């Protein structure tokens, strides 16, 4: 049986070995008033650590919830530490966001704790999850299907959130609370088996413990091994991502050549793209497409991926629609918003030719305003369009120009051209027209800028 002193010593050793709390740091403890959170509070108090208490009243159990709040208020006074309180209408939040009550409470709790931590200047938020919570979480993850990350249980640290009791099992905490005579509130819902976690706690784990009396110690070692394995796994993913991915301003390019050299390339691709909503099965389909013809499209709820000649280009789905009808640009037009793109227009007196400082790239072009026929038209390019690119000996199809500039196939349809009379004077973000270039006798410059950047290349 673990003694009071040994649990306190192990708490100190754990927080140091896991680098959870540095000297001088302050921690905001999430305190429900239950046994686990009150044990955590006493451990912090007896270790002489700087902390405050935070309590969420979820308004789910009527007067019992209010009694929990009053109890925590009294314990904060007893220990002489600050207390931060928040009362939530959890059921209303669940209805508004179409969440279960448990998920709504969890969302409200973690959001408020981090908000309070940042606002009040604390370094960490601590919750009282312990080793048995991690075992229950593992069984839930196994039932739902999980990978290496799920097998490592509850993380000890997640950003500013720490879990300083994960070294201890429920029985050890109960013994400590009894020996210290620590007061706590019992939540009656912990005994209700309509919740999945309670079913596992009361009906699944007891037979396991009977069959494996050393389960707590065994699982403590298992989680340590799995966390180390997960660290190595994630390190490998990051290393290979640096070889396989090129991050653009808006798009992510996945290079087929290095990806296909990896063992289980579908697994690596899933790890690269899971934060963009792509499932493991879709990632396997993507890998199978890499040796086929360009153009195949894959979708997740938030992103699209298209096969191109070098691999895959992944980009967010557009939330703003682009204009398909021509937009008139007069001499006084200043701005046109077109979905995610913005076009800016300006005019100014021609500087002295010898002191002229030219734009740095084709996102901005300067045209001779006196040679333009207003109103200009800003429209999508179409097959058969031609222009005389600046510096070229003759005209060229816009389609050939886009190919030369290696504009990604899925981006070609978004390219706009600026038309003066029957002449294309600018392929936005790529090339300007030779005939309407600035000359020493130009009097007024008409400046055009595509503010969202160049079309990304394949």
Image: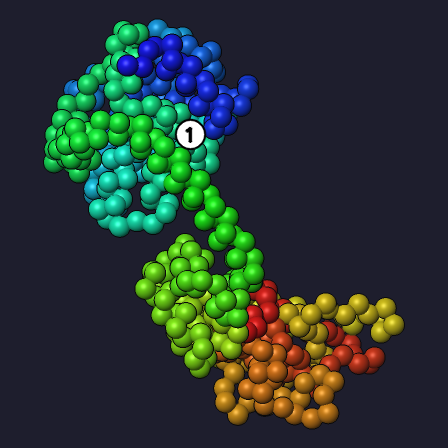
- The residue that appears at 55% across and 89% down in the rendered structure is 385
- 159 w.r.t. 450: above or below: above
- The residue that appears at 33% across and 44% down in the rendered structure is 150
Q: Tell me residue 446's x, y (percent).
A: 68, 74
Q: Tell me residue 122's x, y (percent).
A: 48, 25
Left or right of 202? Residue 340 is right
- 166 w.r.t. 172: above or below: below
Left or right of 2? Residue 351 is right
Q: Is residue 201 visible?
A: no
- The residue that appears at 50% across and 89% down in the rendered structure is 383
Left or right of 102? Residue 232 is right
Give the number of callouts.
Answer: 1
Depth check: give the residue in front, 211 or 325.
211
Depth check: give the residue in front, 169 or 446.
169
Q: Secondary structure at mark 1?
A: strand
- 1 w.r.t. 202: above or below: above
Q: Tell me residue 373's x, y (percent).
A: 63, 84
Depth check: give the residue in front, 317 or 234.
234
Q: Where is mark 1, residue-wise?
A: 162
Q: Quadrant of residue 279?
A: bottom left
- 361 w.r.t. 120: above or below: below
Q: Is residue 309 visible?
A: yes
Q: Quadrant of residue 126?
A: top left
Q: Tell me residue 360's x, y (percent).
A: 72, 67
């Amino acid at each position: 049986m673990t003694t009071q002193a040994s649990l306190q010593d192990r708490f100190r050793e754990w927080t140091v070995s896991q680098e959870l709390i540095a000297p001088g740091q302050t921690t905001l403890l999430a305190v429900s008033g239950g046994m686990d959170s009150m044990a955590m509070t006493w451990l912090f108090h007896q270790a002489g650590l700087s902390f405050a208490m935070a309590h969420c009243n979820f308004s789910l159990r009527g007067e019992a919830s209010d009694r929990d709040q009053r109890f925590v208020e009294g314990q904060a006074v007893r220990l002489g530490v600050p207390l931060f309180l928040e009362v939530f209408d959890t059921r209303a939040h669940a209805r508004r966001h179409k969440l279960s009550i448990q998920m709504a409470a969890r969302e409200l709790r973690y959001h408020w704790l981090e908000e309070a931590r940042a606002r009040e200047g604390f370094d960490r938020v601590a919750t009282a999850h312990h080793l048995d919570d991690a075992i229950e979480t593992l069984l839930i993850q196994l039932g739902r299907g999980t990978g290496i990350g799920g097998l490592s249980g509850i993380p000890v640290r997640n950003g500013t959130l720490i879990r300083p009791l994960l070294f201890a099992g429920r029985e050890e905490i109960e013994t400590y609370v009894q020996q210290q005579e620590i007061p706590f509130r019992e939540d009656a819902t912990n005994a209700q088996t309509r919740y999945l976690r309670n079913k596992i706690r009361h009906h699944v784990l007891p037979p396991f413990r009977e069959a494996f009396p050393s389960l707590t110690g065994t699982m403590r070692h298992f989680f340590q091994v799995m966390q180390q394995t997960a660290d190595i796994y994630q390190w490998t993913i990051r290393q290979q991502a640096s070889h396989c991915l090129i991050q653009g301003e808006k798009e992510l390019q996945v290079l087929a050549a290095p990806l296909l050299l990896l063992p289980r390339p579908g697994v690596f691709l899933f790890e690269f793209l899971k934060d963009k909503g792509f499932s493991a099965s879709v990632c396997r389909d993507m890998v199978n497409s890499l040796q086929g013809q360009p153009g195949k499209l894959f979708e997740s709820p938030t992103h699209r991926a298209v096969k191109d000649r070098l691999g895959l280009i992944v980009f967010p789905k557009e939330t703003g629609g682009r204009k398909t009808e021509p937009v008139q640009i007069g001499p006084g037009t200043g701005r046109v918003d077109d979905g995610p793109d913005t076009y800016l227009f300006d005019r100014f007196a021609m500087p002295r030719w010898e002191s002229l400082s030219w734009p740095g790239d084709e996102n901005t072009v300067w045209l001779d305003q006196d040679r333009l026929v207003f109103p200009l038209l800003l429209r999508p390019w179409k097959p058969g369009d031609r222009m005389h690119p600046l510096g070229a000996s003759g005209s060229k199809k816009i389609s050939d120009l886009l190919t030369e500039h290696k504009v990604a196939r899925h981006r070609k349809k978004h390219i706009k051209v600026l038309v003066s009379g029957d002449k294309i004077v600018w392929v936005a973000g790529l090339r300007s027209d030779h005939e309407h270039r600035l000359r020493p006798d130009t009097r007024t410059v008409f400046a055009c800028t595509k503010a969202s950047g160049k079309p990304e290349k394949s």
